[in-house]
Image (cartoon, rainbow, N blue to C red):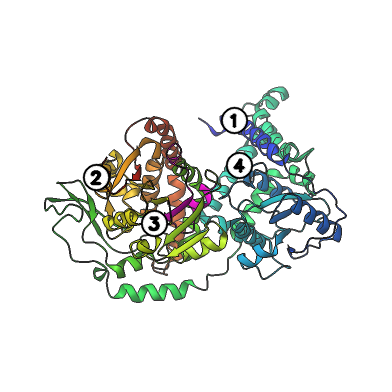
Amino acid sequence: MRLRSTLPLVALGLVADALWRRRRAARLTPLPPSGEPVRDGHRFVTAAGVALDEATRRAASAYAAERSLRVLDLVPAGLDGARALELVRRVDPETYRGARLAPGGTGGHATLVASEVAERAGVTRFSGLSAAEMEELAVRLKRYAPVGTDLVVAPAVAPVPCTPADRRAILRGRWPSDLPVYLSGNLIGLGVLTAVLAREAARCLRGGPAGGPAGGRVREALPALAVLAAASAQPYLVTAGTALRPHDRHRFALTRGMGALHRWIRVALEREAPDPELPRLRERYAAELEAGVERFHEPRRDDCPWCGGTALRHRLTSGDHQHHRPGVFTLDACDSCGHVFQNPRLNLEGLDFHYRDFYDGPGGPEVERGFRLAAPHYRDRARMLRGHAVPKAWLDVGGGHGHFCNAARDVWPRTRFDALDMSVSITEAEARGWIDGGHLGHFPDHADKLAGAYDVVSMHHYLEHTLDPRAELDAAARVLPPGGHLLIEVPDPEWIVGRLAGRWWHAWFQPQHLHFVPVGNLVAALAERGFHTVEVQRGAAHQPVDLLMIVMMLAHRAIPDPAKPWRSGRWTRTRGAARTAVYLAAGPLMFAAAALDQSLYPLIRRTGRSNTYRVLARRLPDKDTR
């Protein structure tokens, strides 16, 4: 299909996109005036150049108090067209407040924040922030007030510009490792579209190759004119009749094509300040790697850690396909029971090396984005208790930053949610209010003092990370009283894609995943510990990302991210450019793989197989062997 023939579809897409954004823009509420004084405990954070008049402060404070809001972003009615359109693309005002894991949205000008939230979130500056700092603050405050945050349009707030440097910093926060790919993709798309439109305009002015009549030239130009008209109409279609009235709406509409390309070029050419921590981290990792990685492994074992059988066979050999730290890792399978395990296994020093800077530090933003997208999956897990129990106190083992507990409150709002983790992330989860209480350390070490304190214990993608899964099940049996429930979710080593894709199946996740327990083994082990399995979910637990992750890991393997501190600091720009080229070339394959994953998802959900399974088991009285 020629590019020219797709122009009508582009025009229709622009109109449909504008109408979709308009539905959101129409839901933005204008700030009603109020004569009441600003409430005690309400503070305001403002960007550089923004002055909040007393009337706006009073109105914002009254609005927040009336709606029990802890954070309220004040969006200027005259916010520039580019940021206005982006805001309603990223934020749905109808669902934003209740979306516990949604990223914070902001107009980048002023925010009301309750003093106690500001204190918990560590806010120390309240004026003179850059647009990028306001974005970072909005993301952080939404985490600390997940259902107490909202936006409102403040007509009296005068808009201030966002510099290309701030724009690039904002995008870096959203695309921590993939910003070059994101920028290049936008520039290429806009460049191609602009070139096609320019070519059509030139053909029209020349009268076409054969010099046809004026009417014919106009008909030839209609697709290009439709695209230009749709692009120019977008700002009006989105904002006309809403509380948003961009101050540059006319100019923004008239320069949609070349103006957008110019803005993206300026952002792409903007140089970023280097990460001051990266050289220090590189030195640390280089010193550790100089001693070799063989020391990170225990001796190879000749028996199965699950059943003790000695009939072992090699399953696969893999590198670290996620972050590309050095090392080679082997998975063996037991022919007697089907258990799959890392052999030789990482020792404690090796586990520390491979976990460091993954879930926190340099790797934190990427992992956070993945956790946010999993909110529907978290709620599905919590719903598995329906019909079996009404939980009063729930302990999530391996709870990390508390993402599951935060999302599960939508299903069980009256339940106390605590979490346990070996990482200090559990402290952050408690500070955010995502959990009611946190326990730091190993589950078996805490089991005796937690006995009887919870009627539900969950382990979501936790057992595969542990040194001894059976000891973790023993700990759950000690904690839960008779009638209590244990909910477990783990990758399914019997999934067909895991066999066919080999080391490229994402759930093998070497080197962090140490054990893969077949569902039959887990059910039997639970029965040995006094649990009765009440439900097993396979298709319903499926995560539709298999094919997409295969393509992504292959592309990532071709050119690993040169910004990782365990990678060499040489030729980073050249390698970064090569990585961008590989990702752009793989883009169509990623899109096709993601589409196929989603197309197969409804079918897989109705089958008895999937890449993930869940088991819900009830603790029986000591003498009950049912």
Mark 3: give few (<14), some (14-19) or many (20+) Cα within 10 Å: some
Q: Which of 40/168 is in front?
A: 40
Tell me, for residue 195, which label it has, or none: 4
Give the x, y percent position of residue 597: 41, 37
Give the labeled residue for mark 3: 559
Tell me, for residue 9, which label it has, or none: 1
Mark 1: give few (<14), some (14-19) or many (20+) Cα within 10 Å: few
Q: Earlier in the sequence, mark 4 or mark 3?
A: 4
Q: Earlier in the sequence, mark 2 or mark 4?
A: 4
Separation of marks 2 and 1 at Cα, in angstroms: 56 Å
Disc number lying in front (2 or 1): 2
Are discs 2 and 3 less than 8 Å apart at CB? no
Q: Amino acid at mark 3?
A: Ile
Q: Amino acid at mark 1?
A: Leu
Local secondary structure at mark 2:
helix
Give the x, y percent position of residue 452: 40, 56
Separation of marks 4 and 3 at Cα, in angstroms: 30 Å
Mark 4: give few (<14), some (14-19) or many (20+) Cα within 10 Å: few
- Is 53 positioned to the left or the right of 323 in the image? right
Give the x, y percent position of residue 505: 32, 46
Q: Earlier in the sequence, mark 3 or mark 1?
A: 1
Name the residue: 40% across, 48% down: 552
Magenta highlight on residue 404: yes
